Amino acid sequence: MTGKHRVILIRHVKTEYNETKRISGQADIAILQDTALEFIDDFTGVIYSSPLKRCRQTLEKLCPKLLDSVVYDSRLTERCMGIFEGNKQFEMQQKFPEYFIKGKLNVFKTVPEGEVFSEFYERVYSFYLDRLAKAEKNVLVCAHNQTLKVLKAILFQDEITLDYWDKNNFENGKMYEYYFE
């Protein structure tokens, strides 16, 4: 990034899948409409978003006056979770324990018909190189938990380990602000 910039990362607001602990991945599901979210109509900069419905609807609530300026980028779409998508995490853990460590999905294992982690990482890294690394303005990114974890690791040059993955979660609807020179 050139100059001093503010980067805001926000995970979409809650969905029914979040409430029922289902694995969403690239399923195009809606947000829970009764979710409250503060408005930020005074943001100046560039807004990037995953094209999935839950991110689009989050931005409709967050910054309705700025929707015309949103750039939707498919590289911000959540990781494809293959045959796990739409299923409850607990049920998948019971049926496929080899994909879990201490009750959590092992990010480095590829779910059947899912996206390989290295390909997912490269997709997000490509977004970073094309959009954030060249940023000359403040940036807001609305995306998904796994996508934002990878993007944060790239921004801070952190190694993605199981420990990093476990400790770096983005709450639904919460904004995380970072400043870079």
Image (spheres, rainbow, N blue to C red):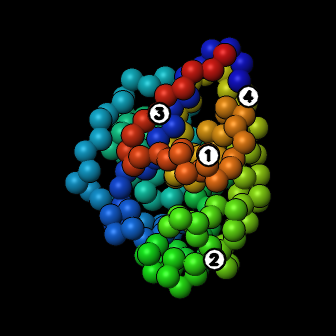
- Mark closest to the chain's N terminus, 1 or 2: 2
Give the mark nearer the N terminus: 2 vs 4: 2
**Residue in the image at 55% along x and 51% along y:** 166
Q: Amino acid at mark 1?
A: Tyr
Q: Who's the residue at 69% across and 71% down the image?
A: 110
- For the residue carrying disc 1, how many other residues have a C-alpha within 10 Å: few (<14), some (14-19), or many (20+)? few
Please state which amino acid type lies under the numbered disc 3: Tyr
Q: Rounded to the nearest whole Å, what is the CA distance between mark 2 and mark 4?
A: 40 Å
Q: Earlier in the sequence, mark 1 or mark 3?
A: 1
On the image, numbered disc 3 is attached to which residue?
176
Q: Earlier in the sequence, mark 3 or mark 2?
A: 2
Closer-to-camera residue (50/24): 24
Q: Quick check: 41 left or right of 85?
A: left
User: Where is the C terminus found, in terms of image quarters?
Assistant: top right
Q: Residue at x 72, y 18 (%)?
A: 2
Q: Secondary structure at mark 1?
A: helix
In the shown orientation, is residue 157 left or right of residue 99?
right
Towards the viewer: 45 or 163: 163
Q: Are marks 1 and 2 in contact (CB under 8 Å)?
A: no
Element class at badge 2: helix
Figure check: 105 above or below 94: above
Q: Are marks 1 and 3 in contact (CB under 8 Å)?
A: no
Mark 1, residue position: 164
Mark 2 closeness class: few <14, some 14–19, many ≥20 residues within 10 Å: few
Residue to which mark 4 is pinned: 134
What crowding class fits label 3: few (fewer than 14 Cα within 10 Å), some (14-19), or many (20 or more)? some
